Amino acid sequence: MTKYRAGVIGLGWMGMMYDLAHRPGPAVGQPRYDLESVDRPTPELDVHRTFHIHDHPGQESLVTSYAEAMADRPDVELVAAAERDEKRLAVFAERYGASGLYTDAAEMLRESNLDLVAIATNIAGRADLTALAVEHGVKGIVTEKPMANSLEETDLMVSSCAAGGVPLVCGAISTSHPSFAAAKKLVRDGAIGDLLSIEATSGSQHQNWTYFMESSPAWVVGTGDTPRRSTGSDEFSGQGFAVGSDGFVVHFRKGAPMVRLTGTTGEMAHTQLQPWRLWQDVDANGVSGRVPMPWPGPQIVSAMGAVYGLNDVIDCMEGRLDEPKNSGRRVATALEVEIALKQSSARGGSRVDLPLADRSLRLDYDWFR
């Protein structure tokens, strides 16, 4: 069995703490564990916590953090971490028995001879760290979401990984779940006839429509965006559509499921953390109608995207998969569409062509990124 040397950059919630601590809600007076300062507080961490592993397709009820997802695999040896907070580094060493402890990520990448890296830092610098990991010979990368702030940052991440032949997953979201591959196979096998349209929510952080879109978006129209919120977020908050180079249309609608695929003889839909549903046209006793049908599986039970994204990266490294389902290329496409939707809305709903010429365009987010 191939044994991959792995490391984690950033021991925050997705890096490590989700599996070792309870994350409190945003109530007034709660400590902020996600501050930029190296002196930020750290919650009480249970270094001896265990998980019940279910051995079945989809691997539900597994772990949440990148550290635990890597440590749980027999083909991965978790050997290093980079984190400015030495208290968290000490916990990492105790739980995983790793001796490669660094307060500087570049030093870790330079010295640790890693095959796999999880980049779970705050968003600033994530693009540069991705490119640096490729430069130092890393063969597979997963990052936290959102992928990046600007188009030039996503360009750097996608191009550097493509040049190095490095599979890149950007965000632990449901798109990496095996049920999405099952859904795509159903579409290609004609289970809902010819695909007519895709309906989805607009946010690029939790996008999954790009996995099903066969052509590149060529232009968009958006409306109803709102100004930057007091939290700092200027993510697109309106509605609209994107048109592919082949004329295929993706609709972005408030209240839509995460993704709905509508065909000539049926449709299927996924709502966040809910089971996939399938409808097909049936003729019975001379009466035709679109009726619910059993989902052939595997079925979503919970997200656990770190596990599934890591699966995809290793499947690519070993030649079983051409591209991760939630690849950096697809997430970068979704970010560009979201920025273009904002531009269209600001211009009164006028058409905006893609690709966007100004690669400095960016989004900001209202949570700890």
Image (cartoon, grey):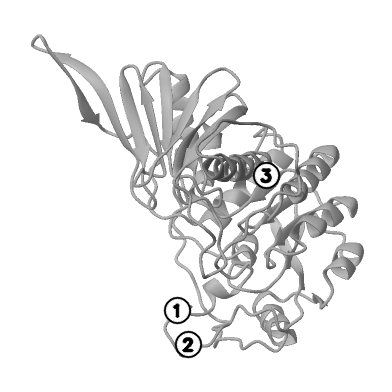
Residue linked to disc 1: 26
Residues tagged 2 and 3 counted as in contact (Cβ below 8 A): no
What residue does disc 3 label?
Answer: 328
Query: For this view, does 269 lie left or right of residue 152?
Result: left
Q: Earlier in the sequence, mark 2 or mark 3?
A: 2
x and y percent of residue 9 in the render? 74, 67
Quote the CA–CA distance across marks 2 and 3: 34 Å
Compared with 3, 249 (above or below) is: above
Under mark 3, the amino acid is Gly
Residue at image location 70% in from the left, 67% down from the top: 121
Q: Amino acid at mark 1?
A: Pro
Residue 357 % position (x, y): 75, 37
| Residue 205 relative to residue 266: left or right | right
Disc 3 packing (10 Å; few <14; some 14–19; many ≥20): many
The residue positioned 43% from the left and 40% from the top of the image is 200
Name the quadrant of the C terminus: bottom right
Secondary structure under the numbered disc 2 in the rendered image: loop
Tell me the CA gap for discs 2 and 1: 7 Å
